[in-house]
Image (cartoon, helix red, strand yellow):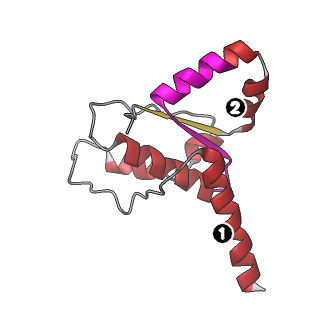
Amino acid sequence: MGDELATRRDRLFARRLKQAGIMEVKSLEAYDWSFNPQVPKALVLDLATARFVREHGGILLLGPPSTGKSHIAIALTVAAIHAGYIVLYHGGRRLALHHVEVIRLQGRSYRMYNRRELLRDNNQRKP
């Protein structure tokens, strides 16, 4: 019984990762906090509780390239999935393009966004 529940939980997690657009799972445990000491660790760890989602808050991560924003954004997205939320992750460029499409379609894509409890935007560069 325990194995079946674990399998279901793992499948749900994998499905939500795919729905969110997460290709590589990152965690705050794997983040090198010494890499960028300006990152407010206590605040990021608090955000990982997903309390801000329950309180209908938002996050905007800003900064120059290669400072850890994407890692943190993905880790927070994964934490929200673990907390039971349905999540949609977009980098800045993809979010802007999708917004244009939402305006063009007037409703169909908007309903998809409206279904998500968390929308992650960061300053991600194209690979």
Question: Within the image, what quadrant is residue 97 found in?
Answer: top right
- Which portion, as a residue range, is magenta? 83-101
Query: What secondary structure is found at the residue carrying circle 1?
Result: helix
Image coordinates of residue 74 in percent, x first then y, are 47, 48
- Camera sees residue 5: yes
Question: Mark 1 is on which residue type?
Answer: Asp
User: Quick check: is 100 in the magenta stretch?
Assistant: yes
Is 5 or 57 nearer to us in this picture? Answer: 5
Q: Earlier in the sequence, mark 2 or mark 1?
A: 1
Residue placed furthest toward the front: 127
Above/below status of 68 relative to 4: above
Question: Mark 2 is on which residue type?
Answer: Tyr
Q: Residue at x 23, y 41 (%)?
A: 38
| Residue under label 2 | 113
- The numbered dot on residue 68 is none
| Residue under label 1 | 10
